[in-house]
Image (cartoon, rainbow, N blue to C red):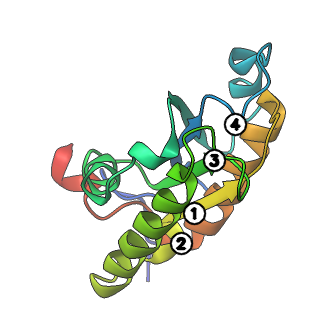
Amino acid sequence: MAPRTETAGEKTAETFKPEIVVLYCQHCVVQDADLTIAMKATSRFRAKLVMMPCTGKIEPSHLLKILAHGADGIQVLGCPYQQCHRLDGNLRAEKRIEYTRQLLHQIRMGPERLGMERGLDFSGLQLMLLAERRADAVKPLGPNPMKGERE
């Protein structure tokens, strides 16, 4: 039997480079963080960094739309408990993320595609390390099944 070769649209575990979208609160990252250098620091996954005024602005529909547009995973970074600059935005975000993870579980896409971390003064390198953790969680799931529909 001949070994199976990769066809267009398929990715093997060795060639799959997860695309991770990092949504982060503007108050969580160090002001002078060099995000462009951090983004070039990896070849194992691709990351798109998106600054938000507050993670409390995240809606489940936004998260699902990001996945529908082909992202393999989403990492959200919000303020620590009781330190949100918008009072309770981080708590709203956490509830919405948990709800969306339940939806991903129900449709068998894997709740591991979405996660949230909390903290302050993240550097560009720390953002990429968190994105890498999300990529590592997504890699066993394989590419986003909705990605093929868009290509």
Q: Amino acid at mark 3?
A: Leu
Residue 82 in percent (x, y) is at 71, 56
Q: CA distance from mark 3 to mark 4?
A: 22 Å
Task: Check residue 112 in the rendering and tell me which mark sits there, or answer none.
Answer: 2
Q: CA distance from mark 1 to mark 3?
A: 9 Å
Task: Check residue 115 in the rendering and tell me which mark sits there, or answer none.
Answer: 1
Residue 54 in percent (x, y) is at 51, 38
Task: Check residue 43 in the rendering and tell me which mark sits there, or answer none.
Answer: 4
Q: Check the image and report above or below for 24 versus 141.
A: above
Residue that label 3 marks: 77
Name the residue nearer the viewer: 7 or 147. 147
The earlier-in-sequence mark between 1 and 3 is 3
Q: CA distance from mark 4 to mark 1?
A: 21 Å
Q: Secondary structure at mark 3?
A: strand
Q: Amino acid at mark 2?
A: Glu
Rendered residue at 36%/59% (across/down): 10
The earlier-in-sequence mark between 2 and 3 is 3
Q: Check the image and report above or below for 4 versus 45.
A: below
Quadrant of the image for the C terminus? top left
Q: Is residue 12 visible?
A: no
Task: Check residue 45 in the rendering and tell me which mark sits there, or answer none.
Answer: none
Q: Check the image and report above or below for 111 versus 149.
A: below
Viewer-side label of 1, 3: 3
